[in-house]
Image (cartoon, rainbow, N blue to C red):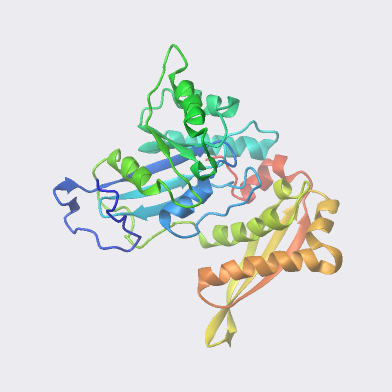
Amino acid sequence: MDPSTPTARPGDAQPEDGSTGGAPFRSGFVALIGRPNVGKSTLLNQLVGQKVAITSPVAQTTRNRLRAILTTPAAQLILLDTPGIHKPHHLLGERLVQSARGAIGEVDVVLLLVDASQPAGRGDSFIVDLLRHCRVPVHVALNKSDRVGADAEDLAATYRELLAAGDDCPVSWPLHACSALNGDGCQDLVEALAADLPPGPLLYPADTVSDQPEQLLLAELIREQVLTLTREEVPHSVAVRIERIVEDEGKTRGKERTAVLATVLVERSSQKGILIGKGGQMLKAIGQGARLQMQKVFDGPVYLELFVKVVPNWRSHPGRLAELGYRGD
């Protein structure tokens, strides 16, 4: 396909008969798999053209299996952003890895993301071994190509060697250099993934970009601000629960105001102190950042009220994890 051919943004018209100039329209599910912090969520946002997944430099940012929808003239790709596969240290970690591994058996295509600015490592080897006997097509995205210089070919060679290793089952999955940050190579990647999807109709309306529940999206926007603004041990120990969403009777600039009440859970009193900050300044900054993002979601003014609650060892408590939606399925 000519690289100058534009990829449709969500909302572009689709052929009513499901065809694309003689070729069948394709639709299906693509799982994004990889180690923590290789750029899965950033790539997801780049592909659909808007923010549907939170991002941060902190590893294990993604905790829920998120579905984003990319519709082109030729196909509709349901992209599953999964938690990074890592060695778990508590029950929450076990459930996140279980969620990611479970996605492999539920999709039509697997996209393995790796950090192409670094040579292949043990974490990549573990995931490749996990996927060697996968029954669906697997593609490898050499992400962060914008960070690679003259040694790009040498680094890519380490991944080709990794795929060829294993006497019992070497694999020859296609490799695609791309940058989730600036979009380089992303159109070619989409076309390659779409070509391996089965023929089928639209599974979602063409203008849909995510089926993420509203409460989950708002909770993630708050957690993103915690990840961005705090350090030390706080980010991994935080969960957010949306208590209430109500339409305020008052209007701001002619638009209905949405009130959101949320609780931020931490495991220790010291973490609560860090989140609140001196004179409440940290919690205020977290709220302001999240509110600005929420106003884009609601296309109108938002009132956000945050509370911080200490729940000791919630990451290792099955009941608490289930309550927060971390079931591992």
In which image quadrant can residue 73 be found? bottom left
Residue at the image point whose x is 54% and y is 82% from the top: 256
Judge whether residue 130 can be spotted in this image: no
Residue at the image point whose x is 76% and y is 65% from the top: 283
Where in the figure is residue 118, as x and y percent of width and height?
A: 57, 33
**Relative to residue 169, is residue 289 drawn left or right?**
right
Where in the figure is residue 315, as x and y percent of width and height?
A: 70, 43
Where in the figure is residue 46, as x and y percent of width and height?
A: 46, 53
Residue at the image point whose x is 52% and y is 32% from the top: 151
In this view of the protein, which residue sits in the foreground, 284 or 144? Answer: 144
**Relative to residue 136, is residue 259 drawn left or right?**
right
Q: Quadrant of the N terminus?
A: top left
Judge whether residue 138 can be spotted in this image: yes
**Relative to residue 256, is residue 58 drawn left or right?**
right
Q: Height in image: 127 above or below 67? A: above
Q: Height in image: 81 above or below 104? A: below
**Relative to residue 134, is residue 158 drawn left or right?**
right
